[in-house]
Image (tube, rainbow, N blue to C red):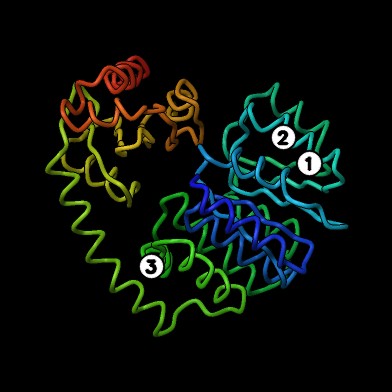
Amino acid sequence: MCARFNRRVLTGLGRFDGCIVHLTHTDLDAVCCDALFRRKYGNVFTIFSSVQDYSSYLELLAQAKKKVDMTLCLSDLGGRTDAFEVVARLKSKGWRVEWRDHHVWDERFFEDIKSVVDYLRVDRELCACEIVYTDLLEGDAIAKEVAAIGRDRDFWINNDPRSEVLSTAISDDKSREEIALKLSRGAFADAEIEAMYALQIGRKNKAISKAIRKSVLLGHTAVTTSNGYTSDVAARLRDEYHSTTELILRENGIFSVRTVAPVSNQIAMLFNGGGHPHAAGGNLSFTRRDQIGFKLVGYRLAKVRELIEAASRFDHS
């Protein structure tokens, strides 16, 4: 996180007159979670974060001036060991903390966090927004539809065309907030969403084509670089190469992994990450020198080779 963004979050928190802070992921499942929190509570301060970065946001919240009766609600963010200490500090400062997730958790960390937070629910059979729905708004027809759309995309069912449109329309935090607000009111499609989708679909197709051109197949593992549209890129790689593992890297060292065998989270956990059995992400912790080296030698960079070799060890094909 940059200092400018930190100041913006702290300034926003200082002006916030509600009591619900929502820390969540960046995909459609997370946006659907946010829509449900907005539908339930109305006034919500939301922070969207990658799974790799959310501990930094927790630290930022711990530094913020505490108002009375504040509740931090985490959703769609897997358990990370470096989150425990700061969550405990938040609790000591009087925060109420609730956590709803569907990633794979380390059992020991689960028990540690459970002993500290006010509420914890991890259910891998549901997507995160379904957990929020059943906990907070079960029986609400609009909330049920929001949760169904989130599940359709997050579990890659793709039977509901609205999930593709909404997922593609998301491009930054502003669009996430706008779509979450619309969904909270039961607006699943309108001219503004269609315009956002039309703008992004061209960018997505261009990004996928660029990622395919940069890709290589190493054994059963397809590797490429892309700064967005991870799931779509992975799906195209699998179609292109009939691969069993797909690695999508960013220039800063953050990566996503998709696998046919249920081992994605195990690979990601080796590199400061986690997620689902078939889809996860982590961070190779690139230094500035690594970033330069990655531009020069690409997939031959030592840290990238280590990731590729780890993925190959988990390949059960």
Location of mark 1 (residue):
90
Quick check: 258 left or right of 235? Answer: right
Q: Position of residue 235 (x, y in %)?
A: 28, 45
Location of mark 3 (residue):
169
The quarter of the displayed image where residue 125 is located: top right
Location of mark 2 (residue):
86
Quick check: 144 left or right of 68? Answer: left
Compare residues 16 and 218 and report the one nearer the observer: 16
Is residue 75 positioned above or below 51 on the image? below
Is residue 34 positioned above or below 208 on the image? below
Could you classify mark 1 by the number of other residues whose Cα lies within 10 Å: few (under 14), some (14-19), or many (20 or more)? many
Compare residues 5 and 74 and report the one nearer the observer: 5
Is residue 179 positioned above or below 279 on the image? below
Q: Position of residue 198 (x, y in %)?
A: 28, 74
Give the residue at x 62% y 60%. Answer: 46
Q: Quadrant of the C terminus?
A: top left
Query: Real-space Cα distance between discs 3 and 2?
Result: 33 Å
Contact, CB < 8 Å: mark 1 with mark 2?
A: yes
The quarter of the displayed image where residue 161 is located: bottom left
Quick check: 222 left or right of 79? Answer: left
Give the residue at x 46% y 49%. Answer: 155
